């Protein structure tokens, strides 16, 4: 099964991708992960991307598509994958379609996890992260400032990108750049919309029932 997963910041997309990867036994492929892998393995495209990233520049679509080509052609993707964080623009969606056709990967599922923006802001501003292990938790999960995951003392803090003004800016960017991608896919594919409000396992069951 090939899944392209969409969702605004804070909607639980990354969490659901990891659970689906385990349950469906297919890899979770995120833009950040494959970029890091390509750089660590010092592939030609990875080194090209690193030069641009070191200068603070965005990695252009042709390099990203090339890195995705190398990943999707790999053995671990032969039975399917969950794509997370790409495509983010209509131009990238068109390039990805060309790549999937080139690789004879014609069947795909487009899954969009949705949530009310007010709920997203509330959810993200109500969480902290651990400086030691990067574990993220809701404020009501702990009575002190100690990490329940690694046990680090006084290690919890609010990340800068979880502040309300930053979240609203991230949501604006998502709505202006990524939502048009869903409009593009609606023209050529059935987009599966999933309500992302609820317990993690409850949302996961909604996704699985629609995929089946």
Image (tube, rainbow, N blue to C red):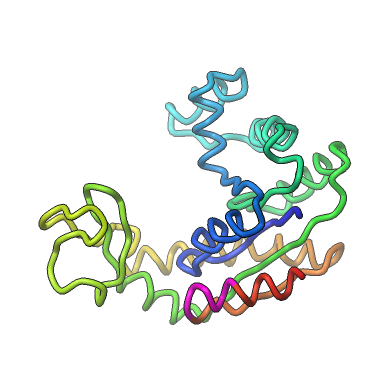
Image x and y of residue 50, in percent:
49, 25
Name which quarter of the figure residue 164 lies in: bottom left
Q: Is residue 199 left or right of residue 138?
A: right
Residue drawn 57% across and 46% down?
A: 30
* Quarter of the image that includes the C terminus: bottom right
Residue at 76% over, 61% down: 109
Q: In the drawing, does residue 95 fall left or right of residue 203?
A: right
Q: Quadrant of the N terminus?
A: bottom right
Give the x, y percent position of residue 5.
Answer: 64, 59
Is 37 placed left or right of 6 in the picture?
left
Give the residue at x 53% y 56%: 18
- Residue 205 percent location from the top left of the image: 61, 75
Q: How many marks?
A: 0
Above or below — where is 198 with respect to 158?
below
Quarter assignment of residue 16: bottom right
Rendering coords of residue 105 (x, y %):
84, 45
- Specify whether residue 125 is in view: yes
Q: Is residue 203 magenta?
A: yes
| Along the line of sight, the residue nearer the viewer: 50 or 211 | 211
Front one among 79 and 6? 79
Q: Looking at the magenta stretch, what is its main secondary structure?
A: helix
Give the answer, above or below, for where 211 lies relative to 84. Answer: below
Q: Nearer the viewer, residue 62 or 28?
A: 28
Q: Is residue 115 above or below residue 67?
A: below
Residue 87 in sight in this render: no
Q: Which residues are magenta?
A: 199-204
Is residue 142 highlighted in magenta?
no
């Amino acid at each position: 099964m090939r899944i392209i997963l969409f969702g605004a910041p804070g909607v639980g997309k990354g969490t659901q991708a990891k659970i689906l990867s385990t349950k469906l036994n297919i890899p979770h492929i995120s833009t950040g992960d494959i970029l890091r892998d390509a750089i660590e393995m010092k592939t030609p495209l990875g080194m090209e991307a690193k030069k641009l990233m070191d200068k603070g520049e965005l990695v252009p679509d042709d390099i990203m598509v090339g890195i995705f080509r190398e990943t999707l052609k790999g053995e671990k993707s032969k039975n399917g994958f969950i794509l997370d964080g790409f495509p983010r623009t209509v131009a990238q969606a068109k390039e990805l379609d060309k790549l999937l056709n080139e690789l004879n990967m014609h069947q795909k599922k487009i899954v969009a996890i949705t949530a009310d923006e007010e709920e997203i802001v509330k959810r993200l501003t109500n969480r902290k992260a651990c400086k030691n292990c990067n574990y993220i938790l809701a404020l009501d999960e702990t009575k002190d400032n100690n990490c329940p995951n690694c046990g680090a003392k006084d290690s919890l803090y609010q990340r800068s990108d979880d502040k309300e003004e930053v979240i609203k800016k991230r949501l604006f960017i998502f709505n202006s750049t990524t939502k048009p991608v869903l409009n593009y896919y609606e023209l050529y594919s059935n987009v599966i919309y999933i309500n992302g409000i609820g317990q993690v396992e409850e949302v996961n069951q909604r996704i699985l029932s629609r995929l089946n």
